[in-house]
């Protein structure tokens, strides 16, 4: 099974199992990682915002326009920001690293 790493707000790293087909948001919730996801993945909030590590960025499919629009409203937006509910785990994404953004 692929694995992925979350870097939490205090800088600590958590490497977890990342089942194919689950979103980064779902994986965070399964592992008690503090990523909100208020709209449960329906692209209506931006609270599932994560910053993708440069090493993983090229493996991701580009964000859809709806995701970009929602991201514009996220706090602490960075160049490699994405919505966690829109990153769906695949075998190729094994080793994915995402960081939780600094809080407002
Ligand atoms: S959970 Fe709301 S946009 Fe991802």
Image: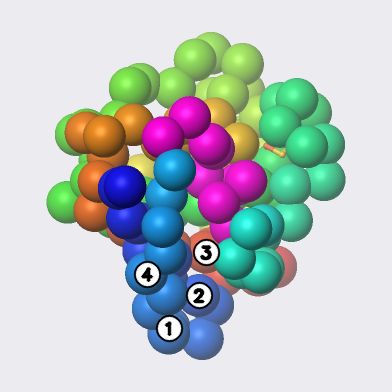
Indicate the position of residue 44 as horizontal and vertical percent values: 79, 28
Q: Is residue 15 left or right of residue 95?
A: right
**Alpha carbon distance from label 4 to label 3:** 14 Å
Q: Which mark sits nearer the N-terminus, 2 or 4?
A: 2
Q: Between residues 15 and 67, which one lies in front from this camera angle? A: 15
Q: As drawn, which residue projects farthest toward the top? A: 65
In the picture of the structure, the residue carrying the numbered disc 4 is 15
Contact between labelled residues 3 and 2, with CB atoms less than 8 Å apart: yes
Q: Is residue 30 left or right of residue 93?
A: right
Q: Is residue 12 left or right of residue 91?
A: right
Kindly indicate the quadrant of the structure image that contains residue 90. Answer: top left
Contact between labelled residues 1 and 2, with CB atoms less than 8 Å apart: yes
In the picture of the structure, the residue carrying the numbered disc 3 is 100
Tell me where the magenta segment starts and ends, as one range.
20-28
The residue at 30%/48% (across/down) is: 2
Q: Between residues 97 and 103, which one lies in front from this camera angle? A: 97
Can residue 96 be seen by looking at this rendering?
no
In the picture of the structure, the residue carrying the numbered disc 1 is 11
Categorize mark 4 by other alpha carbons within 10 Å: few (<14), some (14-19), many (20+).
some
In the picture of the structure, the residue carrying the numbered disc 2 is 8
Q: Between residues 26 and 8, which one lies in front from this camera angle? A: 26
Q: Quadrant of the C terminus?
A: bottom right
Nearer mark to the viewer, of 2 and 4? 4
Mark 4 element type:
strand
Indicate the position of residue 25 as horizontal and vertical percent values: 60, 46
**Alpha carbon distance from label 3 to label 1:** 9 Å
**Alpha carbon distance from label 2 to label 3:** 6 Å
Mark 1 element type:
loop
Categorize mark 2 by other alpha carbons within 10 Å: few (<14), some (14-19), many (20+).
some
Give above or below for 72 relative to 75: above
């Amino acid at each position: 099974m692929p694995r992925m790493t979350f870097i939490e707000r205090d800088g600590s790293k958590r490497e977890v199992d990342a089942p194919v087909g689950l979103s980064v948001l779902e994986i965070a919730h399964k592992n008690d990682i503090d990523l909100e996801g208020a709209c449960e993945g329906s692209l209506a909030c931006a609270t599932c915002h994560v910053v993708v590590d440069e090493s993983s960025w090229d493996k991701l499919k580009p964000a859809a326009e709806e995701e970009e629009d929602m991201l514009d409203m996220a706090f602490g937006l960075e160049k490699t920001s994405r919505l966690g509910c829109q990153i769906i785990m695949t075998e190729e994404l094994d080793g994915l690293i995402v960081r939780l953004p600094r809080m407002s």
